Amino acid sequence: MYELKAIIIGAGMAGLAAGIALRQAGYDVEIYEKTRKLRPAGAGISLWSNGVKVLNKLGLGKEIARIGGEMNRMEYRSHTDEVLNHINLLPLIDSVGERPYPVSRTDLQQIMLEAFGEDDVRLGMRCVAVEQDEQSATAIFEDGTQATGDLVIGADGVHSVVRHHVTGEETQARYAGYVNWNGIVEASPDLAEKDVWVIYVGDQKRASMMPIGDNRFYFFFGCPMGQGTQVEPEKRSEELSKIFAGWPQAVQNLIAKINPLEVNRLEIGDINPLKQLAKNRVVIVGDSAHATTPTLGQGGCQAMEDAEVLSRFLITTNLSVPDALKRYEAERKERTSGLVLKARKRTDTIYGKPPEVTQQWYKQLKEEKPQDVVNALEKIILGGPLR
Ligand SMILES: Cc1cc2nc3c(=O)[nH]c(=O)nc-3n(C[C@H](O)[C@H](O)[C@H](O)COP(=O)(O)OP(=O)(O)OC[C@H]3O[C@@H](n4cnc5c(N)ncnc54)[C@H](O)[C@@H]3O)c2cc1C
């Protein structure tokens, strides 16, 4: 469909990916973002090959390779520093046709903003409602202004307003039962080898580092906890020291190096799979449509896949906008619901729901053939739209 006007709500990775794809197709695209200054939430992200392929198609491949870390191996270690499993990722890269790239979120956002046109994102515009009729869809903003187009794309994250319009009901995020701390440190040999993603597991907790560009590690910690705990930024290293007391030297070195004021601390959640991702001329993408726990590293990658599938149907099918959005929904619902539920199950396994299952998982990690891990990753990656 030619010369459509798309109104996108939200300038996270879902909104920017959809915006870049539709602009490249010659559409008139407007992105509206509620914050006045764009800052990515979180420090790093692992873009698996399925997400990277979409970015390649958008012309960002070279830039992603520039900001990405060279992750050639994965290593599971116990909290007593025993190597449980060591996985060579090169066969995976060979079989799926692209590397995974862990990146800094700030770098990724910068690349995507430049590709879309940074000055074209309208900041300080909080969408409060959406309306539509047979010919158009309209976003209404807090300041009383409106934006009308052929379609509205809700890329407004886990607490989406647009989702409410699409599904007709309130959807609450579900607490997954654990807290995540994350940040970035300079890479050094006393932390981990430079091309390894290392994951320490034990006592239903995790501590991990993965390489990103510019000789840095993205790190994260996870620990089961009741909902509603808060710790002031300056006390976050102290908190981590207590929770991970007695863990291997590399973990202690990491905690000693991090600047507590730059550590993000967040309660992790997801949303139940939705019955609808589109309603006539309004559609949802990214976390708005399928927020997931991050234990498969697929939330952002699914946002990229959404942009690919949505733009493909809009460009190639020519009956009507509602028809293209229905096709998008049909293709994306099963894929994204499946991954949300798979990640939820993995989260429970990792974080002690129940503890016996986690104990069993530690045993399995030790016995598992590296090829089985590669096969599982391959299946997820090749389930995407760009094989
Ligand atoms: C700890 C953690 C680790 C993760 N690790 C990975 C990983 O390794 N790999 C991976 O692929 N994914 C990962 N994810 C998931 C990934 O971060 C998300 O799936 C992704 O950021 C979702 O992007 P989005 O654009 O849909 O939403 P968001 O990034 O939430 O963007 C939504 C945007 O919409 C704006 N907005 C919200 N409401 C309104 C409104 N009413 N009006 C206007 N604007 C609005 C917001 O300000 C924001 O800019 C992780 C998530 C977490 C929490």
Image (cartoon, rainbow, N blue to C red):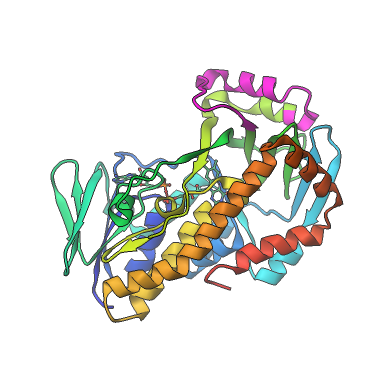
Q: Which stretch appears magenta?
A: 223-251
Residue found at x 43% / y 53%? 13
Q: Is residue 249 magenta?
A: yes
Quadrant containing the N terminus is bottom left
Q: Residue at x 32, y 49 (%)?
A: 169
In x, y percent, where is residue 293? Answer: 55, 45
User: Is residue 309 rendered to the left or right of residue 364?
Assistant: left
Q: Is residue 104 visible?
A: yes
Of all residues shown, which one is farthest toward the left? 144
Is 355 magenta? The answer is: no
Q: Which quarter of the figure has residue 49?
A: bottom right
**Which residue is more in the foreground, 164 or 100?**
164
Q: Nearer the viewer, residue 201 or 323?
A: 323
Percent across and percent down for residue 21 are 38, 67
Identify the image quadrant of the C terminus.
bottom right
Image side of residue 378 versus residue 122, left or right:
right
Q: Residue at x 35, y 47 (%)?
A: 160
**In the image, 361: left or right of 184?**
right
